[in-house]
Amino acid sequence: MKNLVIADTGYFAALANPKDRYHLLALSVSQSISDDLITTWPVITELCHYLVKNISPQAQAFFLDEISTGIIQVVNTEKEHLNRTRRLLLKYADLPMDFADASLVILAEELGHGRILSTDRRDFNTYRWKNHKPFQNLLLPDD
């Protein structure tokens, strides 16, 4: 079984948008990793909004088609996650943290690792899963 890598909105947006400054890097990393991608429905919602606004409704439909093939695993945010989400949003209010990012912190806690693809270096260098474990950004690693 392949390992899972968490995927953030910015990574998907960079893949979809040739004008994004991380587009070529995201393409390169996508071709070099053999792990399966996993994300959350809040990330999908955030990405769909971005795609319609910045690219096209067709780009959104294409992305949803990709998800339907199972190439990307998408996990639900459950009712029992809401209390942890609320605590995270308050803890990182100075950034501020959004719902999609909170869902990825919770996903990392459930997976037991913080391997992520994200263009958001500042936030994912700050966030901690299980309150003290740092994320490992595979798209923009620390030098």
Image: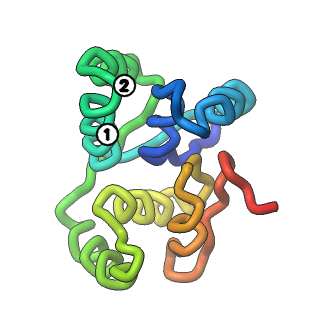
Label at residue 44: 1
Q: How many marks?
A: 2
Label at residue 93: none
Q: Is residue 61 above or below residue 42?
A: above
Label at residue 67: 2
Q: Quarter of the image containing the C terminus?
A: bottom right
Mark 1, Cα crowd under 10 Å, few <14 / some 14-19 / many 20+, is many
Considering the numbered disc 2 on the image, is that residue within a helix, a strand or a loop?
helix
Q: Which residue appears at 41% of the width and 23% of the height?
A: 70
Considering the numbered disc 1 on the image, is that residue within a helix, a strand or a loop?
helix
Residue mark closest to the camera, 1 vs 2:
1
Q: Quarter of the image containing the N terminus?
A: top right
Q: Position of residue 26 (x, y in %)?
A: 62, 34
Q: Position of residue 142 (x, y in %)?
A: 75, 62
Q: Which residue appears at 36% of the width and 39% of the height?
A: 74
What's the amino acid at mark 2? Ile
Q: Is residue 78 left or right of residue 18?
A: left
Q: Label 1 to label 2, Cα distance in Å?
A: 9 Å
Q: Is residue 91 above or below residue 51?
A: below
Q: Are marks 1 and 2 in contact (CB under 8 Å)?
A: yes
Residue 35 picture quarter: top right
127, 25: nearer the viewer:
25
Q: Position of residue 133 (x, y in %)?
A: 60, 75
Q: Position of residue 80 (x, y in %)?
A: 22, 67
